[in-house]
Amino acid sequence: MAHDMDTRRTLRGAALLYEAINQIIQNPRSWDQTVVWHDGNRHCLFGICELVAGIRTRPDRIFDEVRRLIGISESDGYWLASPERTLEQIRWFAGELAAGRVGQDHSKGFDIKAWDRLDARFRRWSLGRIRSKRLVCLA
């Protein structure tokens, strides 16, 4: 393993995403989804997850290590780590993960139609959030 990790103290799953979201809300200038992992004081979601989880790993292993801690498939990881992801989409994904609707192994593959379904579910979810004007995560 590329790092030493105390699994009893390391956040995992939706709790890790919620904590990363809270960090972004508290310090929005530190988040830049277009950055690859870390760039000075700016970090993408997976970079923030690495910091929040308290792990240190090689840059070529961050994606796999964070994805493993979150408990999602490689395809879900690519969707979540995409530079186009907004904070609202990430928050939605964390809620879906907590509810058990994402994060399963996609053994039959994950095609573009599945991504479109994820985006369609997000749009339905976000309309309700926009109306309620809430995005704070307190998991």
Image (tube, rainbow, N blue to C red):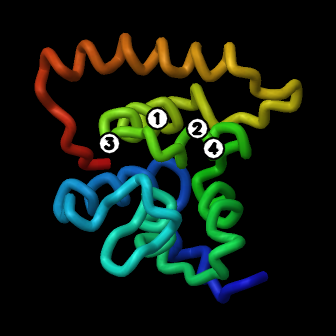
In this picture, residue 117 sits left or right of residue 11: right
Inspect this view and state whether residue 104 appears: yes
Q: Secondary structure at mark 3?
A: helix
Q: Residues within 10 Å of mark 1 (few under 14, many from 20)?
A: many
Residue that numbered label 4 is attached to: 78
* Residue 11 in view, yes or no: no
- For the view shown, which residue lies furthest in the right direction? 108
* Front residue (pair 60, 55): 60
Q: Looking at the image, how many numbered discs can be counted on the residues?
A: 4
- Judge depth for marks 1 and 4 and give the one in front: 4
Image x and y of residue 47, in percent? 47, 67
Residue contact between numbered discs 2 and 4, judged by CB atoms under 8 Å: yes
Percent coordinates x, y for residue 68 in the rendering: 68, 58
The image's mark for residue 87 is 3
**Residue 6, percent from left and from top:** 60, 82
In space, the residues marked 1 and 4 are separated at their CA atoms by 12 Å
Badge 4 local density, few (<14 within 10 Å), some, or many (20+)? few
N-terminal-most mark, 2 or 3: 2
Question: Decide: marks 1, 3 in contact (CB < 8 A)?
Answer: no
Residue highlighted by disc 2: 79
Q: Amino acid at mark 2?
A: Trp
Measured along the vertical axis of the image, is residue 46 above or below residue 100?
below
Q: Quadrant of the N terminus?
A: bottom right
Task: Say whether disc 1 or disc 3 marks the residue closer to the N-terminus.
Answer: 3
Are discs 2 and 1 less than 8 Å apart at CB?
yes
The residue at the point 54 percent across, 51 percent down is: 13
The amino acid beneath tag 4 is Tyr
Where on the picture, by quarter, is residue 116?
Answer: top right
> What is the spatial separation of the Cα atoms under label 2 and label 3, in whole angstroms?
13 Å
Between circles 2 and 1, the one closer to the viewer is 2
Q: Which residue is mark 1?
A: 93
